[in-house]
């Protein structure tokens, strides 16, 4: 290889050395010296080509540098979108854009988005591709928001990921996703209402329960339901009569199957019965046998108790219950006093009445030489002895003893 050729620049007398070595830039000069001025270039100076830097031009500029070029001395450059300053290293897996300033969206499985555009290979369910940053629009859900929501209550949108309705299903629908219509003959919230009886046997609406061609008669106007108790006739606008039971009548004829309540008659129970025509009802009072027997026993016991108490009171009335006056007769006093007399050898005495106006008699008891004195003074008890000497024993009575 021959020595490098030289190019003479008249004004400045500088020389650029052109070499075939790799990573060196071949200096090109125009014929006009104003096209390129290499002030400071010494003869034999080497110059790195674009994309390389360093003393030996052996270092590659970072691929994140704008246009792939960097400072030939230190490698610094302006970073392109998708790379982070100052070294222009590529963004991490969760960031993208200029200086990695934006977050990636919901890429499937946590995959990284594109460091420059932010695009995901695919989105998680419930997010809009390609950036996967926004949830599905209203009434859409699932992978790539490709599925439509069911019929949610109050017409709200479903969950953007799994499609579930937040407040359950709307009227006329069932299922986890509220996408199943009520079975034939049912309608309403949770399909809990019955419908049918439509004209020409048409199917009622699963949402409203209405019959598309109306009702044949004897049913409510819009839902074609059987008349409720107490109503009958076309569209259930007529009221039943005074029917017994729950008050219901035949939906077609208004007849009361359970009869009429008291005071009404007729097949439809709308004729009021006069008071004199009402049947007499005999009221029988039944007294339970056991209760009556107990009551009788109680009454008898009370009567006997009162009688016995009165009898004892009459027999033992004290002396102070009688007031002695001048007009008190001997006969009346004799009813209140007794004397003790007729003592036998056994000390037993017979019963005699006392003469209240005479001196108190005395009774001698042989075996003990005792004497009982009966006086008409108040508050002394009248000793009573039976005719049989065994009725009263006076052993121990002292002469003049009061009782």
Image: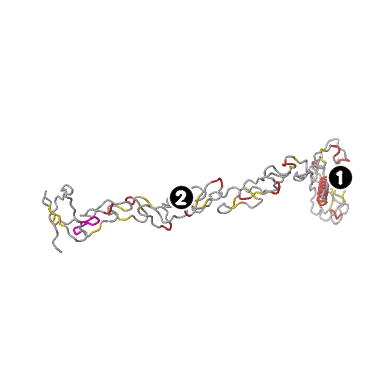
Q: Residue furthest bottom?
A: 1
Between 186 and 255, the residue placed more toward the observer is 186
- Label for residue 226? none
Element marked by disc 2: loop
Tell me if residue 271 is in the magenta stretch.
Answer: no
Residue 201 shows up from this direction: yes
Q: Quadrant of residue 63?
A: bottom left
Q: Which residue is disc 2 drawn over?
A: 135
Report whether 276 appears left or right of 88: right
Left or right of 73 in this view: 293: right
Q: Magenta span has 50?
A: yes
Residue at image mark 1: 354
The secondary structure type at the circle numbered 1 is loop
Task: Give the prevailing secondary structure in the magenta stretch.
Answer: loop
Residue at 17% x, 52% y: name it. 29
Q: Nearer the viewer, residue 388 or 65?
A: 65
> Around disc 2, counting alpha carbons within 10 Å, would you say few (fewer than 14), some (14 to 19), or many (20 or more)?
many
Q: Is residue 352 left or right of residue 46?
A: right
**Label 1, residues with CA under 10 Å away: few <14, some 14-19, many ≥20:** many
Measuring from the top left, give residue 247's x and y in whole percent: 75, 43
Label 1 vs 2, first from the N-terminus = 2
Report the side of 47 relative to 155 (left or right): left
Give the quadrant of residue 273.
top right
Seen at 85% across and 40% down, the residue is 278
Kindly report the distance in space between the C-alpha atoms of the residues bearing marks 1 and 2: 131 Å
Q: In the image, which residues are magenta? A: 48-56
Q: Position of residue 374 (x, y in %)?
A: 82, 46
**How far from the left and from the top, in percent, is residue 93?**
36, 56
């Amino acid at each position: 290889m021959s020595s490098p050729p030289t190019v003479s620049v008249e004004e400045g007398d500088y020389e650029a050395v052109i070499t075939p070595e790799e990573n060196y830039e071949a200096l090109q000069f125009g014929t006009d010296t104003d096209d390129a001025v290499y002030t400071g270039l010494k003869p034999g100076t080497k110059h790195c080509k674009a994309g390389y830097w360093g003393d030996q031009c052996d270092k590659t500029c970072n691929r994140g540098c704008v246009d792939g070029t960097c400072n030939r001395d230190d490698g610094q450059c302006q970073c392109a979108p998708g790379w982070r300053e100052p070294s222009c290293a590529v963004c991490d897996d969760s960031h993208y854009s200029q200086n990695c300033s934006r977050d990636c969206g919901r890429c499937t499985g946590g995959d990284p988005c594109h460091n420059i555009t932010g695009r995901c290979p695919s989105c998680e369910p419930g997010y809009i591709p390609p950036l996967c940053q926004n949830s599905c629009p209203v009434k859409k859900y699932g992978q790539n928001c490709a599925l439509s929501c069911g019929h949610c209550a109050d017409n709200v949108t479903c969950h953007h990921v799994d499609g579930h309705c937040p407040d359950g299903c709307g009227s006329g629908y069932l299922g986890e996703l509220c996408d199943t219509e009520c079975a034939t003959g049912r309608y309403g919230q949770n399909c809990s209402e019955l419908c049918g009886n439509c004209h020409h046997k048409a199917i009622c609406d699963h949402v409203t329960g209405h019959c598309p061609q109306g009702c044949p008669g004897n049913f409510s106007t819009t839902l074609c339901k059987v008349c409720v108790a107490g109503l009958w006739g076309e569209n259930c606008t007529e009221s039943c009569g005074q029917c017994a039971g729950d008050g219901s009548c035949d939906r077609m004829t208004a007849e009361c199957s359970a009869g009429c309540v008291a005071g009404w008659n007729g097949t439809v129970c709308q004729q009021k019965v006069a008071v004199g025509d009402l049947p007499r009802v005999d009221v029988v009072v039944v007294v339970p046998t056991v209760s009556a027997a107990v009551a009788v026993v109680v009454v008898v016991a009370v009567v006997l108790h009162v009688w016995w108490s009165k009898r004892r009171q009459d027999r033992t009335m004290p002396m102070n219950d009688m007031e002695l006056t001048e007009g008190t007769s001997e006969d009346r006093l004799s009813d209140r006093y007794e004397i003790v007399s007729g003592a036998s050898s056994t000390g037993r005495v017979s019963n005699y009445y006392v003469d209240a106006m005479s001196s108190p008699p005395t009774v001698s008891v042989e075996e003990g030489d005792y004497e009982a004195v009966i006086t008409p003074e108040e508050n002394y008890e009248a000793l009573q002895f039976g005719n049989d000497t065994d009725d009263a024993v006076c052993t121990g009575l002292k002469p003049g003893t009061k009782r």
